[in-house]
Image (tube, rainbow, N blue to C red):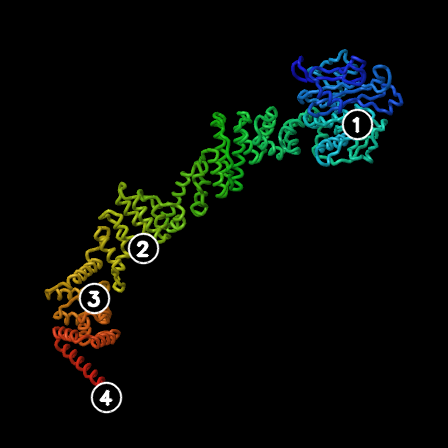
């Protein structure tokens, strides 16, 4: 129906009874009488199998007048598309028997040649002929052809005017919908008027997409419906063509137009909706709706809803339809139904304030694909911002869905101002903290500046709550104003620190906020560092010391930064000895530190009841030597370090000294060192004493040993005596037992050791021991000799007794 006037829409064929030389076969009889150039054997075979007029035998026997025979129309799609109109002519061409008919057919390979016309609408079309062609060539149907009187408005009026017409149309369309299903049923019309049947077929196929309608074959009338290949057939009630009826349908869906009754069939929702729309709306719009629905690519129910929004727009688009529309616009290609997409977008944008967040988000995404006019993109974005802000304020939630990138120039300064006004309005709404957080994240999501100065009360309330609840776990990187709000939080925490709440701030925020290097005078960082040191284990604390000192050493005003950092470390905890050692390792010499840092160390050194340790004195020595600790001149630590050094020096000299004055010097050092230092260096003193081999120095020294040394000396002496390798230790033990009040816990073990040694030692070793004792103390040597004599006498008596036995 469109195209150049000189174009061909259909090739044609004529089939009828011919005189000799009149038809394509050249002989007499029923045959193809004429054809156009493009109608070949395939077209002739198709028409002969499926489309020829079927004269009723009963009427021919009754010799009914020609004018009583109804015209026919048949259609099929089997490789080729073909539609044919037939009529009864009566006697054969030679004037003999009844049965002559003429069938005029059109064929094509292109469904588009039918345009928007359904084949049933070709009934009564002006291009049909009822007479043979003058020659065996018949003209094709040119482009620009027109259908018959069964127009779309005529069909609508026909359905409206027919009693229960909508119900019949719903049943017929539902049956056509199921033709290809396993339980589909062929349609059988019973009617006297072919035009009546073809109006119903036209009505139903107008509510099918054109391609699907072309696939519905029909034959009106047929004398043998079981033999006809088409899905839809019609029989005349007076031709005795079938015994099927509504009451006994033989598997057909029977539509008896004589009695105006039909078979009960399952009704589809699609058929019911379309039939009612067809009689209520502009019928051309409904036909367009059917085509558009088929092209959407959606299931039937959703396709009709979407197509209805495009073709039959309502004043207020339902929300469910809006959701369907935006998802289809977003997910389908812009080349699909391009002439209808704009109408759909217009409806959505026209009602922009009605849509919830999910619809607006999808519509904004559609806008990014260029389907929304430039002047409507900004209103869509503004509506989305408003919806997201409202959702964030009420539920504390922000979507992470991707935003479309707006084209340059679409988003003006005025529109940005409006969007930022929406943010300010949202923050003024007395939101819960979670709502404020979400609103700020929405602002960042859309690249909007938050004008904090216009919502000071809300900001202050939010910051105070944040300071009270560090567990809120806000991510300031998700706020465009994150740095400014963090500064506000710091101000609030500074104020609390200034009000004497440092420990409270530190305990709350020490594990949430990283302290910065103490380069500037920021008390918050000191508080945080002190809290972290208080909470940390040994490893974590030492890491903090290394890290924060490393960050300030070498900076401008490094000494002050070091002083403040070190003071912060141990503001709330005592430094461990290892942490104090780290100061000597990490800091340059002679840095002036707060003396209070060393108060604990000084206290331990000053406490006479607390034992000294090498670690304690070693750390103190390092700190003082490094110039980090500067205790007063009369401080206990100086005296302890001096005494300790003297004792260690004396112990080192004693084993090698030959001058008796050195020995007396050693005794003096022991006497003046004090019990704490001697307890610390006991092992070194004892080792030095055990190494001395000068008998003349021994008596006085052993007599003057302090108890703290004597106890340990006895233990070591017992060990050496038991080893029995060196008589010197036996000499020392014997001398000690007879000249000094040895602690009872050691006396018996010393005595037992000496006796054991003497019973096993050789005569030479015994004499050597006696000689050394004589050098030390002759009186003690006499006791040694008496002990030896007694031991021999005892041995002799035992020997004689054993011999006499």
* Residue 98 visible in image: yes
- Label at residue 574: 2
Identify the disc placed on residue 686: 3
Residue 700, quarter of picture: bottom left
**Left/right of residue 740 with respect to residue 262 in the rendered view:** left
> Label 2 to label 3, Cα distance in Å?
35 Å
Task: Tell me which numbered mark, 1 or 3, is placed earlier along the sequence.
Answer: 1
Q: CA distance from mark 2 to mark 1?
A: 107 Å
Q: Work out whether mark 2 precedes mark 1 in sequence or the reverse, and give the earlier one.
A: 1
Please tell me in which quadrant of the rendered image residue 82 appears: top right
Among the two numbered marks 3 and 4 on one chain, the one whose residue lies closer to the N terminus: 3
Mark 3 to mark 4 CA distance (whole Å): 51 Å
Q: Quadrant of the N terminus?
A: top right
Q: Which residue is mark 4?
A: 804
Q: Examine the rendered structure and indicate whether residue 613 appears above or below residue 506.
A: below
Do residues under tags 2 and 4 come within 8 Å of each other at their CB atoms? no
Q: Alpha-carbon neighbours of circle 4 within 10 Å: few (<14), some, or many (≥20)?
A: few
Closer to the eye: label 3 or 4: 4
Residue under label 1:
234
Using a 10 Å C-alpha cutoff, classify the residue at mark 2 as few (fewer than 14 neighbours), some (14 to 19) or many (20 or more). Answer: some
- Marks 4/1 in contact by CB < 8 Å: the verdict is no
Label 1 and label 3: CA atoms lie apart by 131 Å
Q: Pinpoint residue 103: horizontal percent, then vertical percent.
A: 78, 19
């Amino acid at each position: 129906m469109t195209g150049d006037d000189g174009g061909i829409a259909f090739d044609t064929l004529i089939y009828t009874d011919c005189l000799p030389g009149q038809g394509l076969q050249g002989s007499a009889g029923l045959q193809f009488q004429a054809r156009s150039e493009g109608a070949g054997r395939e077209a002739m075979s198709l028409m002969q199998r499926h489309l020829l007029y079927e004269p009723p035998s009963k009427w021919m026997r009754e010799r009914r007048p020609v004018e009583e025979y109804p015209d026919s129309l048949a259609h099929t799609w089997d490789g080729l598309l073909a539609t044919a109109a037939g009529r009864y002519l009566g006697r054969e061409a030679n004037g003999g028997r009844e049965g002559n008919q003429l069938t005029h057919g059109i064929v094509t390979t292109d469904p588009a040649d039918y345009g928007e016309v359904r084949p049933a609408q070709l009934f009564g079309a002006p291009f049909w002929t009822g007479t043979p062609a003058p020659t065996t060539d018949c003209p094709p149907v040119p482009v620009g052809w027109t259908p018959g009187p069964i127009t779309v408005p005529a069909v609508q009026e026909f359905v409206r005017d027919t009693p229960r017409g909508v119900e019949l149309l719903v049943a017929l369309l539902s049956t056509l919908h199921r033709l290809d299903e396993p339980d589909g049923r062929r349609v059988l019309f019973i009617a006297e008027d072919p035009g009546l049947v073809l109006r119903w077929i036209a009505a139903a196929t107008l509510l099918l997409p054109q391609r699907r309608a072309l696939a519905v074959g029909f034959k009106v009338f047929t004398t043998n419906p079981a033999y006809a290949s088409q899905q839809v057939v019609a029989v005349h009630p007076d031709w005795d063509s079938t015994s099927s009826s509504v009451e006994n349908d033989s598997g057909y869906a029977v539509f008896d137009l004589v009695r105006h009754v039909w078979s009960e069939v399952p009704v589809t929702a699609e058929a019911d909706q379309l039939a009612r729309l067809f009689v209520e709306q502009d019928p051309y719009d409904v036909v367009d709706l059917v085509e558009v629905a088929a092209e959407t690519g959606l299931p039937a129910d959703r396709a009709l809803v979407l197509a209805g929004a495009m073709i039959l727009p309502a004043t207020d688009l339902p929300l469910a339809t809006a959701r369907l529309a935006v998802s289809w616009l977003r997910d389908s290609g812009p080349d699909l139904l391009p002439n209808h997409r704009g109408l759909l977008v217009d409806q959505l944008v026209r009602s922009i304030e009605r849509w919830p967040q999910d619809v607006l988000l999808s519509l904004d995404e559609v806008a990014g694909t260029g389907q929304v006019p430039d002047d409507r993109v900004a209103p869509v974005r503004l509506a989305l911002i408003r919806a997201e802000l409202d959702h964030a304020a009420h539920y504390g939630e922000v979507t992470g869905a991707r935003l479309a990138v707006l084209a340059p120039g679409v988003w003006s300064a005025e529109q940005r101002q409006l969007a930022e006004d929406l943010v300010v309005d949202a923050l003024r709404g007395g939101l819960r903290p979670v709502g404020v957080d979400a609103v700020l994240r929405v602002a960042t999501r859309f690249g909007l500046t938050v004008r904090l100065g216009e919502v000071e009360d809300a900001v202050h309330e939010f910051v105070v709550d944040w300071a009270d609840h560090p567990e809120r776990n806000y991510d300031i990187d998700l706020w465009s104003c994150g740095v400014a709000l963090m500064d506000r939080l710091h101000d609030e925490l500074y104020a609390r620190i200034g009000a004497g709440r440092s420990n409270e701030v530190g305990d709350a925020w020490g594990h949430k906020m990283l302290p910065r290097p103490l380069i500037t005078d920021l008390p918050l960082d000191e508080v945080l560092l002190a809290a972290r040191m208080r909470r940390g284990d040994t490893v974590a604390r030492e890491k903090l010391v290394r890290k924060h000192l490393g960050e300030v050493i070498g900076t401008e005003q490094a000494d002050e930064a070091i002083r403040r950092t070190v003071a912060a470390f141990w503001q709330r905890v005592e430094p461990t000895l290892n942490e104090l050692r780290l100061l000597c390792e990490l800091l340059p010499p002679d840095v002036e530190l707060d003396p209070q840092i060393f108060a604990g160390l000084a206290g331990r050194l000053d406490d006479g009841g607390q034992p000294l340790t090498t670690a304690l004195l070693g750390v103190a020595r390092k700190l003082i030597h490094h110039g980090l600790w500067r205790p007063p001149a009369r401080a206990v630590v100086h005296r302890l370090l001096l005494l300790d050094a003297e004792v260690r020096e004396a112990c080192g000299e004693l084993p090698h000294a030959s001058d008796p004055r050195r020995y007396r010097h050693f005794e003096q050092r022991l006497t003046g060192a004090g019990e704490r230092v001697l307890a610390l260096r006991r092992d070194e003193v004892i080792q030095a004493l055990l190494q001395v081999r000068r008998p003349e120095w021994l008596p006085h020294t052993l007599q003057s040993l302090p108890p703290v040394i004597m106890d340990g000396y006895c233990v070591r002496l017992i060990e050496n005596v038991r080893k029995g390798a060196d008589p010197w230790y036996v000499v020392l033990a014997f001398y000690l037992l007879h000249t000094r009040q040895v602690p009872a816990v050691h006396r018996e073990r010393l005595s037992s050791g000496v006796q054991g040694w003497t019973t096993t030692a050789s005569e030479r070793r015994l004499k050597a021991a006696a000689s050394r004792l004589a050098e030390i103390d002759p009186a003690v040597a006499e006791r040694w000799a008496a002990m030896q004599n007694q031991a021999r006498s005892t041995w002799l008596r035992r020997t004689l007794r054993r011999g006499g036995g």
